[in-house]
Amino acid sequence: MTSDPRTDELASNLEGVRQRVRAAALAADRDPDEVALIVVTKFFPAEDVARLVDLGVTDVGENRHQEASGKAAECAARDVRPRWHFIGGIQSNKAAAVAEYADVVESVDRAKVLRGLVNGVERAERDPLDVLIQVSLDPPDADHRFGVAPDGLAELASIAAESPHVRLRGLMAVAPNGEDPSVAFTRLADIRGEFLGANPDADILSAGMSGDLEQAIAHGATHVRVGSAILGSRPPLG
Ligand SMILES: *Cc1c(COP(=O)(O)O)cnc(C)c1O
């Protein structure tokens, strides 16, 4: 226990999620150390990121550029330096700016965004940026609002391979609303199997959130992105 009730709350939630991850990995005959936790801090202040880092969290996720860039700057000023994962939709004209603070961009879903990130890395003269391609698990006839359809993966992978400024590390996905996550993640495991055949080093699979991390781990997730189960429920979008 500490003298700060919020830190105690985060510590206890974090422990609960770590136990869920561990149990899910063991149930799937996997090594629990193969599954990394990204704590999604969107809507919560830099103060909470600082508390989480004190509690041993190494990776945090954000989904809106404005909020993420401000929070990353605020944290850096306090010498709080987690790895920042950008997990939200990116406007292509903002991609270069995201490359200034993100350590990993998980939501690459079209060529324009990828090219914007490459330009941003070049401009910032920073180390290569780790990227994941977000693959859509929506039915083939849906309009893929977030994520590229599986048949678009190869083209994005080949664009990434042309640049020394990005390193393609794997795939990210979100289970569609209203579908059984086990069914969606079974599809994802197939897509990933084919993708790994062509890109054997890009072996990260970021899938699973507060409500479906067990199903994601059962289907091969190497990274889970957990927000509300650790930070509490978010204020409704205004
Ligand atoms: C918000 C968000 C999460 C975390 O969701 P929770 O249900 O709060 O755990 C994970 N992934 C993405 C892409 C998100 O936008």
Image: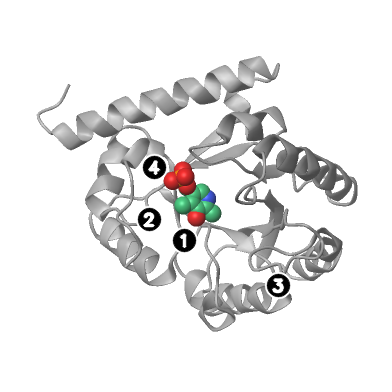
Q: Which residue is mark 1?
A: 63
Question: Which residue is more in the foreground, 141 or 155?
Answer: 141
Question: Which of the image's four quarters has the N terminus?
Answer: top left
Residue 110 numbered mark, or none: 3
Labels 4 and 3: the sequence-earlier one: 3
Residue 2: image quadrant is top left
| Label 3 beta carbon less than 8 Å to ligand 1 | no
Q: What is the distance, in whole Å, between disc 2 and disc 1 at their CAs?
A: 7 Å
Labels 2 and 3: the sequence-earlier one: 2
Badge 1 crowding class, 10 Å Cα cut-off, few under 14, some 14 to 19, many 20 or more, is some
Question: Which residue is more in the foreground, 96 or 15?
Answer: 15
Q: Which residue is mark 2?
A: 42
What residue is at 61 percent from the left and 61 percent from the top? 107
Is 171 situated above or below 228? below
Q: Position of residue 58 (x, y in %)?
A: 43, 40
| Label 1 beta carbon less than 8 Å to ligand 1 | yes
Q: Amino acid at mark 2?
A: Lys
Labels 2 and 1: the sequence-earlier one: 2
Q: Which residue is mark 4?
A: 228
Foreground disc of the pair 4, 1:
4
Q: Position of residue 218 (x, y in %)?
A: 69, 27
Is 236 situated above or below 92? above
Q: Position of residue 163 (x, y in %)?
A: 74, 70
Badge 2 crowding class, 10 Å Cα cut-off, few under 14, some 14 to 19, many 20 or more, is many
Labels 4 and 2: the sequence-earlier one: 2
